[in-house]
Image (spheres, rainbow, N blue to C red):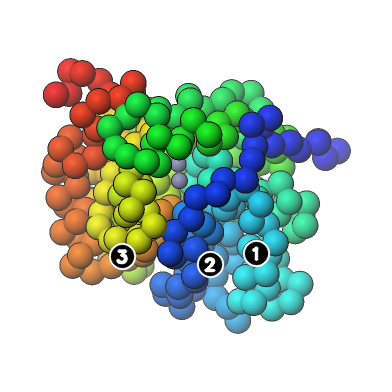
Amino acid sequence: MKEEMSYGRDYKIIPATSIGSGIGITVLPDIYCHTIQIVNISLVGNPDSQDFVLVDAGMPGSADSIIALTEERFGAGSRPKAIILTHGHFDHVGAIIELIEHWQVPVYAHELELPFLTGQQQYPAPDPTVEGGAVAKMSPFFPHEPINLGNRVEVLPADGTVPFMPDFRWIHTPGHAPGHVSFFRDLDKTLIAGDAFITVRQDSLYKVLTQEEGVNGPPRYLTTDWQAAWASVKTLQQLYPETAVTGHGLPMSGEALATGLEKLAAEFDRIAIPDYGKYVDKKLH
Ligand SMILES: [Zn+2]
Ligand SMILES: [Zn+2]
């Protein structure tokens, strides 16, 4: 039996946007990244096949555009085999209920994200006092109450494989969220990093608007465990990704990615961890 699904009571359309909004980029022949306002979704799979998945599910109210761009790439009436989540923050599950209802496909997430996706637990409130600008100041307005996907959400396989993403493995990269995962393909060193690190300064409204490029730590106002977040960045850097698609900002590759990620892993305390904020451990400074 299918259970009722519901968004949190504080679910709402968020007016924030960026110049990247509505733009799609074919990062690799089988990786398409599209920006919904300020967040990225990815379609993973060859456009000439029907074997593809959607990674993350966009902003509130974006289901129609996600369906339209999916049909544009894979043909009318096409649907992914599954929706795979890097984590459950509102900007990554904003359209998920409409998408599940339209496509009737399963959702996969790390087991530690399940309480936030099944109505059991809410994420800690975003920290509007954290060092860093306008988006943080807006963050109390962001939904953080849990959505309930009922039994439509399943746990990622324990063996590290990713359903319907045959060459990828998932890697637990907590810190930004307890069950945050990244996806890595060893064959060509392609990384889908979610918010483990991002390629735009999310705490600066100006840089979100202009999508100025650079490797940065996870969005500050929602990150609650900075030591875990640092360890996760080190784990990803050690994979030496050739191409990275992140939850926010433009895809990056090659030398710019390698040097940016190396610097972030080495100087995470200086670059990523804010100087103040309610989730910042004073002992780090
Ligand atoms: Zn997030
Ligand atoms: Zn995000």
| Farthest-out residue, top | 283
Picture coordinates of residue 145, whole percent (x, y): 60, 29
Amino acid type for the residue under numbered disc 3: Met
Q: Nearer the viewer, residue 171 or 277?
A: 277
Q: Which residue is mark 2?
A: 22
Residue at x 18%, y 67% (from the top left corner): 255
Amino acid type for the residue under numbered disc 2: Gly
Q: Residues within 10 Å of mark 1 (few under 14, many from 20)?
A: some
Of the residues under marks 1 and 3, which one precedes in the sequence? 1
Query: Where residue 65 is drawn, which disc sits there?
Result: 1
Picture coordinates of residue 235, whole percent (x, y): 27, 44
Q: Nearer the viewer, residue 30 or 268?
A: 268
Residue 184's image quarter?
A: bottom left
Say if mark 1 contacts mark 3, CB within 8 Å.
no
Q: Quadrant of ligand 1?
A: top left
- Left or right of 135, for residue 252: left
Of the residues under marks 2 and 3, which one precedes in the sequence? 2
Q: Nearer the viewer, residue 180 or 64?
A: 64
